[in-house]
Amino acid sequence: MNPWRTFFDHHAPRYLQEVFTRNTEAEVRFLLNELTLPPGAWILDVGCGVGRHAVLLAQAGLRVVGVDLSSGMLRQGQARACELGVSVDWVQADASCFGFGGQFQAAICLCEGAFGLLNAADNPYAHELMILRNIHAALAPGGKLIMTVLNGMAMIRSATRDAIERGAFDPLTLVEASTLSYQSPEGEQTIPTRERGFVPSELRLMLEVCGFEVEQIFGGTAGNWGRRPVDLDEIELMVIARRGRAARVTPCAQTGMGL
Ligand SMILES: C[S@@+](CC[C@H](N)C(=O)[O-])C[C@H]1O[C@@H](n2cnc3c(N)ncnc32)[C@H](O)[C@@H]1O
């Protein structure tokens, strides 16, 4: 099983206790302001998790589809939507191989919602290109994408020679290997994971190869969003892009890159 699914399935009931989730209402105001969607517009939340953005976007009158790998996270989202009396379509799928056909006016992929979260076998280029290709295919022409990703520049600046020698950080792919722990009925469990950072220039290139036009890259650390320049040391970057011309990445099977 994908280690991220195992981790998030167990972490789901505690996810909203994470400090970085505290500013969700302000984040949703930012999204609504940037996206300027009419009521009833369709928006896709990729790696939606417990739907902390999805549910509030639905409350604001949008039609929301949330995609996530973790049934545990989706269950929390369902319960929250039920509590608030709003409707979100929850879809359990891997973001690197789901398919929607151009019906969304906007998409979000926030706080490493699948993008940059790798399992042991994932190619760190192909995995992310497949996610972008799938989001591109889901968007209507001109549809906007807002995503936040790990800031590779900060990862490089904090990497130590020791971490590189131990294989905990690969400066060529910007993949960080770490061990996460979670509580299970059998006690504390650990699980090896891989997370990838991005530098703005490669992120722009990846998006353009997949048929997006990048409007702006901002600093985008969770809980602190705004139209402001990137700080080299902040945790995340935010990209605002639009679906442009046809993707230059051809449809590919789960195993292939198809560039
Ligand atoms: C850090 S959480 C972010 C959730 C949400 N976007 C937020 O801002 O709270 C990352 C989410 O990505 C999901 N995820 C990880 N890999 C995925 C994949 N390949 N496809 C779909 N979802 C994935 C996890 O299950 C988890 O819910």
Image: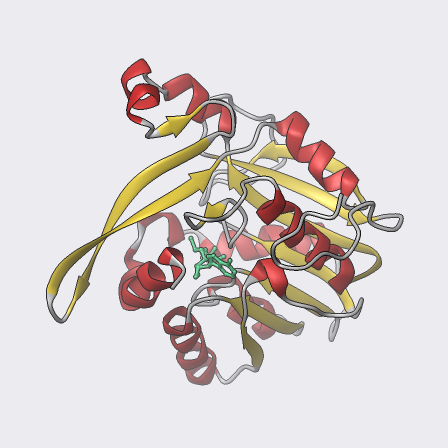
Q: At which x and y percent is residue 219?
A: 56, 32
Residue shown at the point (74%, 48%) measured from the top left: 258
Q: At which x and y percent is residue 136?
A: 75, 55
Image quarter where the C terminus lies is top right
| Residue ranking furthest to the top | 161
| Residue ranking furthest to the left | 187
Residue nearest the observer in this picture, 245 or 88: 245
Residue nearest the observer in this picture, 116 or 86: 116
Residue 156 vs residue 72: left or right?
A: right
Circle count: 0
Residue shown at the point (36%, 72%) measured from the top left: 72
* Vertical comparison of 92 with 151: above or below: below
Image quarter where the N terminus lies is bottom left
* Vertical comparison of 62 with 157: above or below: below
Residue nearest the observer in this picture, 213 or 36: 213
Residue 151 vs residue 100: left or right?
A: left
Q: At which x and y percent is residue 199?
A: 58, 27
Q: At which x and y percent is residue 62?
A: 67, 72
Residue shown at the point (80%, 66%) measured from the top left: 102
Residue shown at the point (72%, 41%) measured from the top left: 207
What colour scheme was applied to this rendering of the protein?
secondary structure
Kindly indicate the quadrant of the structure image that contains residue 94: bottom right
* Vertical comparison of 36 with 84: above or below: above
Residue nearest the observer in this picture, 33 or 144: 144
